[in-house]
Image (spheres, rainbow, N blue to C red):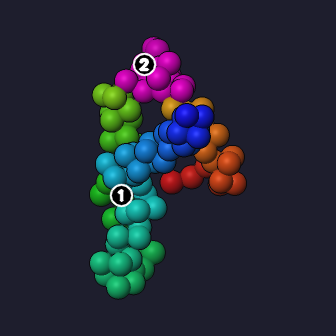
Amino acid sequence: PYTAALLYVLAIPLYLIFYVSTFLVSPSKNILRVVQDDQGATYQTILQALERENFVSLRLGELQDSGCVGRSGEKFVLTPSGRNIARVLKIYQKVLGQTPGG
């Protein structure tokens, strides 16, 4: 029973990563798509593709809609569920030795 519980707990970050990564488009994913679609791309082409996407506004809207981020006056703040997700992602990055990034 302990092994099953441990496997379940260890699978939670994997679920979050796959769930989030399938729905969200990051700048890195967009760059890879542009370079792949064009079989190579200039810096200018990549920059234009990124400018067409308004990643910050789009992502903030999604985070607000999902209840992870709220507003406090002029500032965006993490909600309790947002803080929990941020903690899990930080642990995940430490375990894998990754630095923050998209």
Q: Position of residue 7 (x, y in %)?
A: 54, 43
Residue 71 badge = 2
Range shown magenta: 67-84
Q: Nearer the viewer, residue 29 or 44?
A: 29
Left or right, residue 100 beside residue 60: right
The magenta stretch spans residue 77: yes
Q: Which quarter of the rendered picture does the N terminus lie within?
A: top right
Query: Horizontal and vertical percent for residue 67?
Result: 37, 24
Residue type highlighted by circle 2: Arg
Task: Determine whether the residue tagged by mark 2 lies in a helix, strand or loop.
Answer: strand
| 68 part of magenta stretch | yes
Residue farthest along the front direction in this orientation: 1
Indicate whether 46 appears above or below 73. below
Mark 2 closeness class: few <14, some 14–19, many ≥20 residues within 10 Å: few
Residue placed most toward the observer, 19 or 27: 19
For residue 55, above or below residue 50 = above
Image quadrant of residue 61? Answer: top left
63 to the left or right of 93: left
Q: Position of residue 66 (x, y in %)?
A: 34, 29
Which-is-in-front pick, marks 2 and 1?
2
Of 36 and 47, nearer the camera is 36
Identify which amino acid the numbered label 1 is placed on: Glu
Going 33% across and 65% down the picture, which residue do you hit? 49
- The residue identified by callout 1 is 51
The residue shown at (63%, 48%) is 93
